């Protein structure tokens, strides 16, 4: 029987197809390892040096919680004599107040609790008595910010002395008297940051929380032509300096001191940059670009080290600030994708950080960069460190108490605080033994003092 004339050609075509598939696979594997090499890196000598470092313990001089992430902007409470387990339905509720939409956390200062939220067609900054929940004053102004990922303001107010500083979702900034008893609040000064600094709003709204250092309020408008970062006089709002061309991000600035030099760290849309508080001059920077300018988490400063983390597949990095230059020079210790903070920031306890690696609660060894455990079931969320315990608030409304245990997740208590799934993004706050938690409708104050139940 004669051979079929098409068979040799089919065989050759099949061989070419298989060869092409193999080539594509090889290219894909090579690209994958190239990307991994770009995202995972470590300096063995610096990792070895890090293993010998003893980090300083957090030190707070006040039990107030006057700003974003507390007295030191690290999400750490040093309070003692607290409950080590909660009742089945949660700790004793002292009071509850109606709020509105928004993701701002709470500031506590001199017996008052403050936050900002969407209030009909306004943004409202509100002060309550921290122990009773009685509303003291409400300062409102026209602003109805809407967004598919949640309406309302994002930034937590900062209280310094008798002044409060708030920033809304469209960049409207107000300095108010925090101690006033006027039911309508009392304005000191105001600014439209986006207008004054010629900046466009971010895709998901202005989100940084203002930082007060000495006589300055540090802000990140994100305008071009030297309008990216700025310092304002805290009493008048006068611009003391404005510099740099960075795109804004959703992260909040932090104060640090490296090698005796006070500095302000901004995690902008594409880099971590250190500037002088009094002039804005750059000391150093470390590139950290991310799509859509989505650097959101707050940097964690530990002596001469800085830990940064970003979601959207970016990952985390540990930096050592070496001596050199006017304010030091950053060097990479390691970077990897084992801690990818989306909207919330990690907290540090001893040699580990605890936070959300995308949608899983996780623990990362700071010295090695290795993840030691992860726990599902919170649907992203935020975390607060109190002594050796974690207070975990899931985006699904679950509020839990767990050990800050580096080996495994050990939960002590949990209850369903809110039914607003995927919208519980406001970080809990603990001050004077009281735990403040909010969602898009209410702010609740719980008593977590030992012996009070």
Image (spheres, helix red, strand yellow):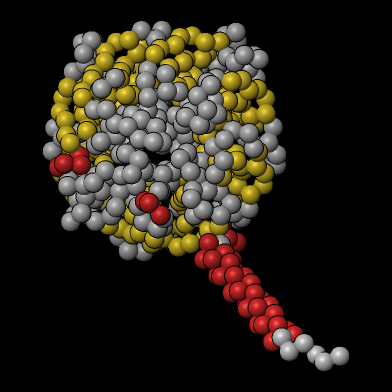
**Measured from the top left, where is residue 34 in percent x and y?**
55, 70
The image shows residue 245, relative to residue 450, as above or below, that is: below
Residue at screen point 37% across, 24% down:
101
Task: Give the vertical position of 268 relative to 5 (above or below).
Answer: above
Give the left or right position of residue 7, taking residue 136 as reference: right
Question: Relative to the observer, which residue lies in front, 309 or 56?
Answer: 309
Instruction: From the top left corner, tell me how far across and down residue 182 is, in percent.
Output: 20, 10
Viewport quadrant of the C terminus: top right
* Rendering coords of residue 28 (x, y %): 59, 70
> Looking at this rendering, what residue extends furthest in the front direction?
1
In the image, farthest residue toward the right:
1
Residue at image coords 52%, 48%: 340
- Residue 180 sits above or below residue 362 on the image: above
Q: Is residue 112 visible?
A: yes
Q: Position of residue 49 (x, y in %)?
A: 57, 60
- The residue at the point 65 percent across, 38 percent down is 375
Count of numbered tags: 0
Query: Dividing the picture into quarters, in which one does residue 61 lie?
Result: top left
Along the line of sight, the residue nearer the viewer: 105 or 101 = 101
Quadrant of the rendered image containing residue 125 = top left
Left or right, 48 with reference to 384: right
Residue 266 visible from this viewpoint: no
């Amino acid at each position: 029987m004669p051979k079929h004339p098409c068979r040799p050609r089919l065989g050759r075509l099949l061989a070419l197809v298989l060869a092409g598939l193999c080539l594509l696979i090889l290219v894909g594997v090579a690209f994958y390892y190239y990307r991994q090499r770009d995202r995972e890196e470590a300096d063995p000598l610096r990792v070895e040096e890090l293993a010998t470092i003893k980090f300083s313990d957090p030190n707070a001089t006040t039990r107030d919680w006057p700003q974003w992430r507390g007295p030191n902007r690290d999400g750490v409470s040093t309070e003692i004599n607290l409950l080590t387990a909660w009742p089945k339905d949660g700790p004793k509720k002292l009071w509850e107040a109606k709020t509105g939409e928004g993701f701002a956390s709470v500031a506590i200062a001199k017996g008052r609790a403050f936050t900002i939220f969407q209030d009909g067609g306004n943004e409202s900054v509100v002060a309550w008595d921290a122990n009773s929940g009685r509303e003291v004053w409400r300062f409102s102004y026209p602003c109805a910010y809407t967004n598919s990922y949640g309406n309302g303001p994002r930034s937590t107010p900062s209280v310094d002395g008798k002044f409060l500083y708030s920033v809304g979702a469209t960049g409207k900034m107000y300095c108010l008297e925090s101690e006033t008893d006027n039911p309508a609040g009392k304005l000191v000064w105001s600014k439209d940051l986006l207008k004054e600094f010629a900046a466009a709003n971010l895709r998901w709204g202005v989100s940084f929380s203002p930082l007060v250092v000495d006589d300055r309020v540090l802000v990140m408008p994100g305008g071009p032509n030297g309008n990216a970062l700025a310092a304002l006089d805290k009493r008048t709002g006068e611009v003391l300096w404005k510099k740099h061309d960075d795109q804004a991000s959703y992260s909040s600035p932090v104060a640090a001191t490296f090698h005796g030099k006070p500095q302000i760290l901004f995690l902008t849309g594409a880099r971590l940059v250190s500037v002088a508080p009094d002039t804005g001059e750059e000391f150093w920077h470390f590139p950290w670009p991310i799509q859509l300018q989505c650097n959101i988490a707050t940097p964690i400063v530990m002596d001469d080290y800085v830990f940064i983390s970003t979601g959207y597949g970016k990952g985390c990095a540990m930096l050592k600030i070496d001596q050199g230059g006017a304010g030091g020079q950053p060097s990479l210790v390691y970077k990897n994708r084992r801690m990818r903070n989306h909207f919330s920031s990690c907290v540090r306890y001893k040699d580990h950080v605890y936070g959300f690696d995308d949608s899983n609660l996780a623990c990362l060894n700071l010295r090695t960069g290795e993840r030691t455990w992860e726990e599902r079931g919170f649907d992203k969320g935020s975390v607060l460190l109190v002594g050796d315990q974690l207070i975990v608030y899931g985006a699904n409304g679950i509020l839990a108490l767990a050990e800050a245990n580096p080996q495994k997740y050990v939960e002590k208590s949990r209850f369903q605080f809110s039914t607003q799934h995927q919208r519980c993004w406001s970080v809990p706050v603990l001050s004077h033994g009281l735990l403040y938690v909010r969602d898009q409708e209410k702010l609740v104050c719980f008593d977590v003092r030992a012996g009070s139940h």
